[in-house]
Amino acid sequence: AQSVTQPDIHITVSEGASLELRCNYSYGATPYLFWYVQSPGQGLQLLLKYFSGDTLVQGIKGFEAEFKRSQSSFNLRKPSVHWSDAAEYFCAVARGGYQKVTFGTGTKLQVIP
Amino acid sequence: DAGITQSPRHKVTETGTPVTLRCHQTENHRYMYWYRQDPGHGLRLIHYSYGVKDTDKGEVSDGYSVSRSKTEDFLLTLESATSSQTSVYFCAISGTPDGTNEKLFFGSGTQLSVL
């Protein structure tokens, strides 16, 4: 069965600092990988996705993620965090389409001035 | 954002009562999903639908049933609500009319409290 691990429950960064959120997955074949963001009281919004091809994926709001097969990782990065990035971030893995998507438990990002 | 409306947005009910949550989409997407979100568990799939009257179970389907009689509506029913079903419920859709299935769009959620 596929699974996703987000080892950091909560992260605090200073505004303007760089950010990296970790995600490790378990899946036998090449997975479909996603990062979603959830603001308080809202649904989830897709930041970026990886299906195949270039392992460095660009997303919205200045985020990027790199697929590393050897490490079973799909870490999310942003070079300079803004206060509006404070939210909860979810990594997800799917095998061929959205019918079987498994979400991680999420990482809450706090941004301090 | 995709046109997804969940109703009600908030509901408080008592243990043992039936509850129905509604998801309505205006996008003519093929697939519809119900998730629940709980602290420490992320989102977990309850049921999903791949067409009118075609549904299947997800990871945490016990105690829930669904129906999809029209493309635009997907109902989630708790036949006899329990306190363990207190959660935030999200509807999602995917599968555009032109056949692509690259994005999963979420509704704004329903906060359900079972007392």
Image: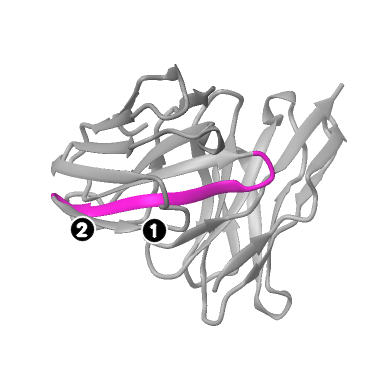
Residue indicated by mark 1:
A98
Q: Is residue A48 above or below residue A112?
A: below
Give the quadrant of the N terminus of chain B.
top left
Give the camera-side residue of B5 and A52.
B5
Give the quadrant of the C terminus of chain B.
top right
Give the camera-side residue of A13 and B70.
B70
Q: Give the crowd class for mark 1: few <14, some 14-19, many >=20 residues within 10 Å.
A: many
* Magenta-drawn stretch, dominant element (helix, strand or loop): strand
Q: Is residue A81 on the magenta stretch?
A: no
Q: CA distance from mark 1 to mark 2?
A: 13 Å
Q: Secondary structure at mark 1?
A: loop
- Mark in front: 1 vs 2: 1
Image spot of residue B74 (x, y percent): 24, 39
Which picture quadrant has residue B79?
A: top left
- In contact (CB < 8 Å): disc 1 and disc 2: no
Q: Is residue B46 on the magenta stretch?
A: yes
Residue shown at 77% from the left, 38% from the top: A80
Image spot of residue B44 (x, y percent): 51, 50
Q: Give the crowd class for mark 2: few <14, some 14-19, many >=20 residues within 10 Å.
A: few
- Chain on which label 2 sits: B
Numbered label attached to residue B99? 2
Image spot of residue A81 (x, y percent): 76, 35
- Chain on which label 1 sits: A
Q: Mark 2 belongs to which amino acid?
A: Gly
Which picture quadrant has residue B7?
A: top left
Q: Is residue A53 above or below residue A57?
A: below
User: From which residue to which does the magenta span run?
Assistant: B39-52
Q: Secondary structure at mark 2?
A: loop
Residue at the far front in the pictured view: B16
Residue shown at 55% from the left, 82% from the top: A28
